Amino acid sequence: MEQLIEIGFQPVGRWMLSEDGALKAEVDIHAKLHKNVLYAFVVEGQVMYVGKSTTGLRQRFQSYATPGKDSSTNVRCHQHIREHVEKNTRVEILSMADKGLHKYGSFHLNLAAGLEDSIIAMLKPSWNGEREVREAVEREQVTEAPATLAELVTDSFSFNLAPAYRDNGFFNVPVRSSRLLGNNGETLELLLGDDPTPQYSIVNRTSNKNGSVRLYCSQPLKRWFKNISPNTRIEVDVVSPLSIHLLNPISEG
């Protein structure tokens, strides 16, 4: 669950039973306003199901509350949800809306479609079923030998690890290098040292008066910065405007 929270998922409601015993989703009204949405069902901190909708949560969740006989996925989710709710086990709903801010040039990137397979392949939620998980894993696999990070690097920059960065899990990109990164509000991928697991931050171009980019990634950055001495020079490779790699400092001596 924490992995989803870190990339922007938010708790928006829960499943419950109505007075007549019907299954229904109690969802924050603001979460119903977005059409293109990724969502997850969570039980006791464990992600049990991940899905996406292009019609909004209200319509999608109705198909779980009253599933048609021909939809095995909806029937399976209905049964799992009802089983837990009837035992008074809380089934939380998390969601992340695609607000249309992510673009590649003039083209809109469908964040929900892009992330769904990756999340399912990594977390393997049990309610998605073995077949759905297997297909997600297969779609995530690269058939050709992947390029190394070094081959993908387009530019680089560096910054000094100020005590404030180290203590609070953020850093400012130099003014000159800020042009290399995405637009304000876009989601940016960070790779930290040798850890292959990506972390995520929002490109912030409003916090600094000079317009330079500030990147927050509180807990992951604080953990990574912890073993690095203050004022150490951190080298950063730019893979794309929305992907950077912070390199492990070179030990002296």
Image (spheres, rainbow, N blue to C red):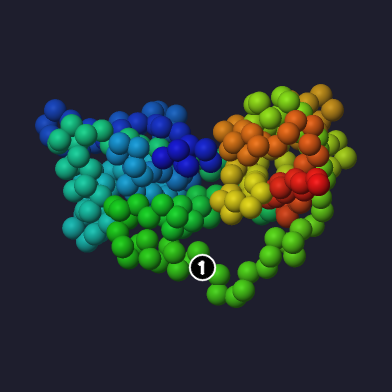
Query: For the residue labelled by badge 1, is the local secondary structure a helix, a strand or a loop?
Result: loop
Q: Outermost residue toward the right? A: 176
- Please identify the quadrant where the N terminus is shown: top left
Residue 252 picture quarter: top right
Instruction: Report if residue 195 is visible in the image.
Output: yes
* 165 lies above or below 188: above
Q: Position of residue 214 (x, y in %)?
A: 73, 33
46 or 140: nearer the eye?
A: 46
Looking at the rendered structure, the number of numbered marks drawn on it comes to 1
Question: Residue at 35% of width from left, 37% of height from top?
Answer: 45
Q: Position of residue 231 (x, y in %)?
A: 79, 32
Residue placed under numbered mark 1 in the picture: 141
Which amino acid type is shown beneath numbered disc 1? Answer: Gln
Q: Position of residue 169 (x, y in %)?
A: 64, 31
230 or 116: nearer the eye?
A: 230
Question: Residue at 43% of width from left, 62% of height from top?
Answer: 136
User: Around disc 1, counting alpha carbons within 10 Å, would you say few (fewer than 14), some (14 to 19), or many (20 or more)?
Assistant: few
212 or 3: nearer the eye?
A: 3
Q: Position of residue 77 (x, y in %)?
A: 25, 50
Residue 73 picture quarter: bottom left
Horizontal side of 250 relative to 19 (left or right) equals right
Question: Residue at 32% of width from left, 47% of height from top?
Answer: 48
Q: Outermost residue toward the front? A: 253
Q: Outermost residue toward the bottom? A: 144
Instruction: Report if residue 205 is visible in the image.
Output: no
Question: Residue at 62% of width from left, 74% of height from top?
Answer: 145
